[in-house]
Amino acid sequence: MPSNPVHGPIGVFDSGFGGLTVLRELVRSLPDYDYLYLGDNARAPYGTRSFETVYRFTLECVQYLFSQGCPLVILACNTASAKALRTIQQHDLPAMPDPSRRVLGVIRPSAEAVGAMTVTGKVGVLATPGTVKSGSYLLEIAKLYPDIEVFQEACPMWVPLIENGEYATPGAEYFVARHVHALMAKCPAIDTVILGCTHYPVMAELIRRYLPPGVRLLEQGRMVADSLTHYLRRHPEMDTRLSRNGSCRFLTTDSTDLFNKPATLFFGRAVEGHLVTVS
Ligand code: DGL
């Protein structure tokens, strides 16, 4: 660690609005810390983009949050966690001027939580095409619980519907029904379904309506908040670098006129964004 390490907020990143569902739970569980949220709205959605593009965009956003003084950044985006986290942790971070800063994702905490939930050992994952194609959930869950069988369903229309404010329309209902039925058709014994995209909690009620009774639907915010709480307990050297004034600031790469209203819906409290350029 450098002799005078950076002292600052926890950075929370997503391609757009979805990470605000995670930030909401982080603030609920760890209210004393400062948070700096960055939504790359100008380039969202990431879910259908190539590995290289998601990696490049994510790295630029992480570097931006580091430049704003964040010692720790959470990728509150499954797509970015699946396609960029490992390379950033193993390749980019060690080469940075302060390699003691940290980047964490949302897939590992979700994989950890699922073991205690499933009884049948059959787990479903609803996610973007990018996350599904990466196979990250299959890998992470297999590492921790080799006996659990994982079934995935890519839902390419869900993020665009949500980002465009169409998540409570008959169109959304059609696509929710289609993908939930397709997932359950892969294995009717699935008893636990992970919402593997941080945008999806705004459609959680609708998704629940199409799941068979008794199937549990896991939203990630809580799991990520619990995991961060344990992480900070295990890593006091990081915990002491995080500032604590209970503040939240919001940055977006697109117009704040387009950001503030949907962001308020996702976060559940009034949000006032600031426009930034990250690349
Ligand atoms: N919220 C992001 C996730 O958790 C996906 C959004 C996108 O496709 O950009 O995967």
Image: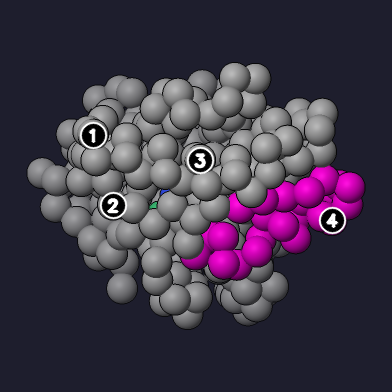
N-terminal label among 1 and 3: 1
The alpha-carbon separation of the residues under discs 4 and 3 comes to 28 Å
Q: Alpha-carbon neighbours of circle 4 within 10 Å: few (<14), some, or many (≥20)?
A: few
Mark number, residue 160? 2
To which residue does mark 3 refer? Answer: 181
To which residue does mark 1 refer? Answer: 170
Q: Amino acid at mark 1?
A: Pro
Marks 4 and 1: CB-CB under 8 Å?
no
N-terminal label among 4 and 2: 4
Q: Amino acid at mark 4?
A: Lys
Magenta part of the chain: 130-152
The alpha-carbon separation of the residues under discs 4 and 2 comes to 32 Å
Q: Amino acid at mark 2?
A: Pro
To which residue does mark 4 refer? Answer: 143
Q: Secondary structure at mark 1?
A: helix
The residue that appears at 66% across and 61% down in the rendered structure is: 136
Number of the front mark, 4 or 1: 1
Mark number, residue 138? none
Q: Is residue 215 left or right of residue 61?
A: right
Specify whether residue 69 is in view. Answer: no
Q: Is residue 235 left or right of residue 21?
A: right
Q: Position of residue 1 (x, y in %)?
A: 71, 61
Image vertical order of residue 159 relative to residue 239, above or below:
below
Q: Alpha-carbon neighbours of circle 3 within 10 Å: few (<14), some, or many (≥20)?
A: some
Q: Quadrant where the C terminus lies?
A: bottom left
Specify whether residue 259 is in view. Answer: yes
Q: Position of residue 234 (x, y in %)?
A: 80, 39
